[in-house]
Image (spheres, rainbow, N blue to C red):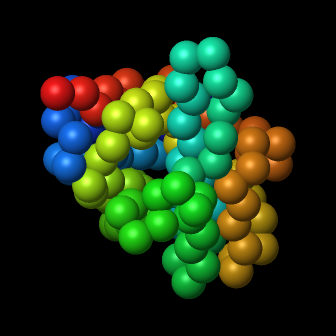
């Protein structure tokens, strides 16, 4: 059974950092595109970043460019989201998602992804 489990969320002060992990089980994640999404209270789920199955393509939302970095460790079947210079506006539940697309493509929109984790809460507050 294909499963995604997010971890690494928590409470951090503005300007701080967190590293989120998306651990895959039941499938070999290196063959899947992975996306990170977030949803703040009262708002729609939005794309944050994604990485292609080949690892050569990454995309970021404009709001996180230069602050967040996505990477994958295929040996650990895990994708990471390093978040630096966090702002209160980054507060949300963060989800990872997976699906099979072209090895060179990834998407930061919700619709193409069929497999989702349960989410991890990130709160940025002083």
Q: Position of residue 94 (x, y in %)?
A: 47, 35
Q: Residue at (18%, 47%) from the top-left corner?
A: 16
The answer to whether 74 appears left or right of 83 in the picture is right
> Dividing the picture into quarters, in which one does residue 101 lie?
bottom right
Q: Position of residue 57 (x, y in %)?
A: 60, 79
Q: Residue at (39%, 61%) from the top-left corner?
A: 68
Outermost residue, top side: 42
The answer to whether 73 appears left or right of 119 in the picture is left
Q: Quadrant of the N terminus?
A: top right
Q: Is residue 125 visible?
A: yes
Q: Is residue 58 above or below residue 49?
A: below
The answer to whether 91 appears left or right of 126 in the picture is right
> Dividing the picture into quarters, in which one does residue 91 lie?
top left
Q: Is residue 53 above or below residue 5?
A: below
The answer to whether 16 appears left or right of 38 in the picture is left
In the foreground, 14 or 111: 14
In the foreground, 97 or 124: 124
Q: Is residue 6 visible?
A: no
């Amino acid at each position: 059974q294909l499963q995604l489990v997010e971890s690494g969320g928590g409470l951090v002060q503005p300007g701080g950092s967190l590293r989120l992990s998306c651990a895959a089980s039941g499938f070999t994640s290196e063959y899947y595109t992975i996306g990170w999404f977030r949803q703040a209270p009262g708002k729609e789920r939005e794309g944050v970043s994604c990485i292609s199955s080949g690892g050569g393509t990454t995309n970021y939302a404009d709001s996180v460019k230069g602050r967040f970095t996505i990477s994958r460790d295929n040996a650990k079947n895990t994708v990471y989201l390093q978040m630096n210079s966090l702002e209160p506006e980054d507060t949300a539940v963060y989800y990872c998602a997976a699906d099979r697309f072209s090895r060179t493509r990834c998407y930061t929109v919700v619709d193409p992804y069929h497999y989702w984790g349960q989410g991890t809460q990130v709160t940025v507050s002083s």
